[in-house]
Amino acid sequence: MGELSAGVTRYALGMLTIAYAFNFIDRQILVILQQSIKDEMGLMDWQLGLLSGFAFALVYVTAGIPIAYWADRGNRRNIIAIAVTVWSGMTALSGFAQNFGQLLMARVGVGLGEAGGSPPAHAMISDYFPPERRASALGFYSAGLHFGIVLGFLIGAVIEEILGWRAAFMAVGLPGVVFALVFFFTVKEPERGRFDGADAASYKPTLGETFRVLVEFRSFWCIAVGCGLTAFGGYGVGNFLPPFMERTHELTGLTLGIVMAIGGGGAGLFGTLMGGRISDSLGTRDRRWYLWLPAIAGIMAFPLIIPMLLWGDVMVVVPLMIVVTALTNTYLGPCLATCHALVPPSMRALTSAILFFVLNLIGLGMGPLTAGILSDHFTEFYGVDGLRYALLCVATISATGVFMFVLGAKYLPGDFERRELLLAESR
């Protein structure tokens, strides 16, 4: 079993987290810029939903599974370096788009690159950190998502105000290409399965075997759907919060960027970190806490979403946004750690990809598109308040994810017993 120093593992986790931050800077920069893009190109809200959600998610989830299968056998560090280069380059090219079709193709390219980011990173982290620390490590990594959102909102708002939305795409895309080179030359690929024993590490399942193993775990599919429904609200409401705050509360420019950076990115970062740490602490007593925690957080968040969207005073809305965002982002670290604990090390990248397939198809794919379609429909009757009611509908649908986490917790003990039988059969 290869030994890695604490410094090496911390550096690797930090670099993986920065890569994930670049992932979300490049993914979410469109969100803060979309009102300007809509005005210049004359787009409808459903087209914004297509750009920020469905079109991106379709190629992301389609490419994610074959890339993850490659990552379970190949050098994961190299795959991530290539992925960062592709998505960063395509983000920079988005600034040259002259119409909806060209911007759509650029966003498809970003999705293709980002499909190679998280599943290999998840698998590397599970080989850097032992099981009792994985949720915290995966939570720290997942917090890069919100760090990226903070930077995306702030950088996008500032550069758009000074140089326009096209320059903002280029400013966040080009540094990612440089980072990819640094990542390639300085991050060490960990030994696969270093905490799982020689038998588990040497097991090399086929694609079909991986699917057959996952079919046996009912908790996995509950987790996947629960994550998808939670992300349905996260992306559906979150991607339209900037135009909502602009249209309803008349926030613009740097003020809007700061509000969204704190209420969207900063609060989400806090919730993701705490979700990993608290679940690792409670999970030592009962593994079901890894799913009970996001369920409880979802139950606490929903009553606060209603006044957040309906209240007229922005001084009330922003604090509610902070609390709701923190609560609804506790799920990712615990859910990833649970899924990785269920499968052998050579299945982890693919397991993450399948989890993200469901999560992004439901969440990123359908959330913003549904919000955009409902907004266009309600706007015909309610004017500027149409977006408000559209987001309320999306949030209500998203709240049903709580039931899937509770159901997954019910199946979890039996699935861990089933895991041991499957591993014994594979030896």
Image (cartoon, rainbow, N blue to C red):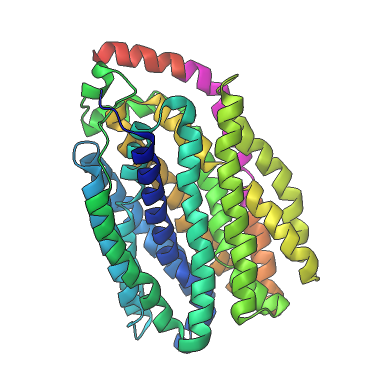
**Is the N terminus in the top left, top right, bottom left or bottom right quadrant?**
top left
**Is the C terminus in the top left, top right, bottom left or bottom right quadrant?**
top left
**Residue at 79 percent of width and 68 percent of height:** 315
Relative to 359, 323 lies left or right: right
**Residue at 40 percent of width and 55 percent of height:** 18
**Residue at 53 percent of width and 58 percent of height:** 235
Q: Is residue 50 above or below residue 34?
A: above
Is 350 or 268 nearer to us in this picture? 268
Magenta segment: 397-415
- Image position, residue 39 (x, y; %): 51, 86
Q: Please count the marks in the image.
A: 0
Is 77 or 48 nearer to us in this picture? 77
Residue 60 seen from this side: yes
Q: For the stretch drawn in magenta, what is the main secondary structure? A: helix
Is 42 or 70 nearer to us in this picture? 70
- Image position, residue 260 (x, y; %): 61, 67
Does the magenta-highlighted stretch encompass residue 398? yes
Relative to 364, 209 lies left or right: left
Q: Is residue 301 above or below residue 41?
A: above
**Residue at 68 percent of width and 36 percent of height:** 296
Does the magenta-highlighted stretch encompass residue 348? no
Residue 224 seen from this side: no
- Image position, residue 142 (x, y; %): 47, 47
Place residue 408 in its image quadrant.
top right
- Image position, residue 332 (x, y; %): 51, 42
